[in-house]
């Protein structure tokens, strides 16, 4: 699979509210940071327009599990 371009940045350790963020699947503590625009027609179709916002995603560098934060 090719989720990331060849210019992939180094994964970072992340703290949320002063606590170390760990992947809920594999326990890894390093993530790739991505900013996502959630303004998609599928959310409108599903009548969940409150998701039409920006989000910050942290993608586990080990298993690619995604942790979302509204921002
Ligand atoms: Zn993981």
Image (tube, rainbow, N blue to C red):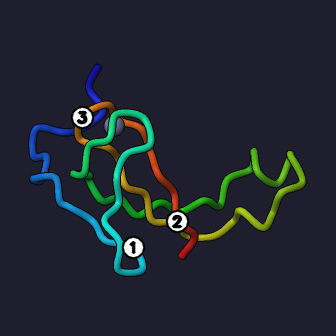
The residue carrying mark 3 has its beta carbon less than 8 Å from ligand 1: yes
Residue at 17 percent of width and 59 percent of height: 12
Secondary structure under the numbered disc 2 in the rendered image = strand
Residue in the picture at 24% in, 34% down:
62
Q: Quadrant of residue 66?
A: top left
Residue 16 image label: 1
Query: Could you tell me residue 29's position as x and y percent?
Result: 25, 51
Q: Which mark is residue 26?
A: none
Q: Looking at the image, is 20 positioned above or below residue 31?
A: below
x 74%, y 50%: residue:
41
Circles 3 and 2, Cβ within 8 Å, touching? The answer is no
Cβ(mark 2) to ligand 1 < 8 Å?
A: no
Tell me what residue is drawn at x 52 percent, y 65 percent: 69
Query: Given the current orientation, which residue lies at the most extreme bottom position?
Result: 18
Residue 43, position as x, y percentages in the image: 76, 51
**With 52 as the anchor, is 46 left or right in this view?**
right
């Amino acid at each position: 699979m090719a989720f990331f371009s060849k210019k992939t940045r180094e994964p970072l350790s992340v703290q949320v509210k002063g606590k170390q963020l760990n992947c809920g699947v594999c326990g890894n503590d390093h993530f790739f940071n991505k900013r996502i625009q959630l303004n998609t027609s599928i959310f409108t179709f599903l009548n969940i327009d409150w998701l039409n916002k920006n989000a910050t995603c942290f993608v586990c560098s080990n298993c690619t599990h995604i942790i979302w934060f509204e921002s």
